Each structure stands twice: as structure tokens, then as C-alpha cells.
Amino acid sequence: MTDAAARKNLAEIIYRRSFGRGDVTLASGKKSDYYFDMKPSMLDPQGAETIARMMHERVVAAGADHVGGLELGAVPITGSLVAVSVSCGKPLRGFIMRKKQKEHGAKKHIEGLAAGESLKGKKIAILEDVTTTGGSAAQVIEECRAQGAEVALVLSIVDRDEGAAEFFAGQGVTFEALFKAGEFRSRTD
């Protein structure tokens, strides 16, 4: 399948399984008349593989060696991307940042790293399912930088195009998305 055909197929999966209309309050606190619930697309076999392959290309181009993001949205993407990265010839390691540090066991805030391992010196790509203002990824950027990682890229499946690009530019971080919300909002079928 060509890149263009894969992208078109993924757009159809997202539209059919994850795009909806109705009054909602977004994680950013903003009100909207449409939404994306990306879990059905990220957990669809074809959706998961296509998202991972499309993201892998961009992550490698950014020079990142680790991928991850904030729970829950980044969990399926990270798992798929790490798995697909092996067959793409450039294996990546993954991590997940908890919204709140675990209060028992090892009391981790970042999951996926081996004992004694940190993000120090790693080049990171932060993954998101849907990006509105950039607030969720900002938490991950802050924690990764505090651990000594370089944030090379924030990569989202869908950019709602409501200020995230400008926010990340102000943070000195490259931001990319596989799709813009307008690609789905403009459909009338």
C-alpha cells in the first residue's frame, strides 16, 4: 500500500470509529461541538499498525530513540509504535508518564524504564492521540527535560488546530500531526 493509500485508509478508520459530533468539554476545558475518541482507532488492528508506521517515519526523521507520553492517550500508540519499530528497521524504546506518581511499589512516575535507567541523555518523541492546546504534552515535556532528556518532537494523530503549534513553537519543540481536525469536520457524509 502506498503512503497516500495508507493515509486515506487511516482517515476513513478515524472518521468511522473515532470522530463524533455533539457538545463536549475537552481536556483543555474548552467547549466543542465535535470530538475525537481515538481509542477505537488506536485499538483497531489496521488503525494501530498504520498509525505506528506513519509515526515511526516522523520519529526517526526527528532523531528520537525513545517514544512515549501521558497516560491514557499515549499508551496504545506507544505500544504499537515500539512493536512496529522493529520491523521498520529502527527499534525504539517506549515509556509512559503517569498523570500522578504511583503511591505504592516502586512509586514510579515514568513507566517502561528498567531499574536504574532514566531518560537522561535520551532523545524523546512525545506522542499524543489528539492535541488541542498542548497542555497535556507540556507536562511530559517538563518531566522529560527535568530528567535530562532532549525533547525532539511532539507528534499527534490529530491536531485540533486550536493553538498547540504556537504553544510548542514557544517551547522550542517541533510539533507535527498526522491529520488536522478540519479534514474530518469538513466531511458531510
Image: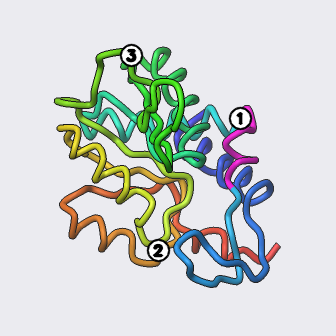
Going from N to C along the chain, the mark reached first, 1 or 2, is: 1
Name the residue located 52 percent from the left edge and 66 percent from the top edge.
Answer: 180
| Badge 3 element | loop
Q: Which mark is residue 46?
A: 1
Spot occupied by residue 146 in the image (x, y as percentages of width and height): 21, 45
Please name the residue that numbered disc 3 is placed on.
Answer: 114
Mark 1–mark 2 CB contact (< 8 Å): no
The answer to if 45 sits in the magenta stretch is yes
Q: Nearer the viewer, mark 1 or mark 2?
A: 2
Classify 131 as above or below 151: below
Image quadrant where residue 65 sits: top left
In space, the residues marked 1 and 3 are separated at their CA atoms by 30 Å
**Residue appearing at x 57%, y 69% in the figure:** 27
Q: Are marks 1 and 3 in contact (CB under 8 Å)?
A: no
Question: Which mark is drawn over residue 161?
Answer: 2
Disc 1 secondary structure class: helix
Label 1 crowd (10 A; few <14 / some 14-19 / many >=20): some
Q: Dot 3 surroundings within 10 Å: few (below 14), some, or many (20 or more)?
A: few
Between 167 and 16, the one lying in front of the other is: 167
Q: Is residue 165 above or below residue 38?
A: below
- In this picture, residue 122 sits left or right of residue 84: left
Q: Which residues are magenta?
A: 38-46
Helix, strand or loop under label 2: loop
Q: Is residue 77 left or right of residue 69?
A: right
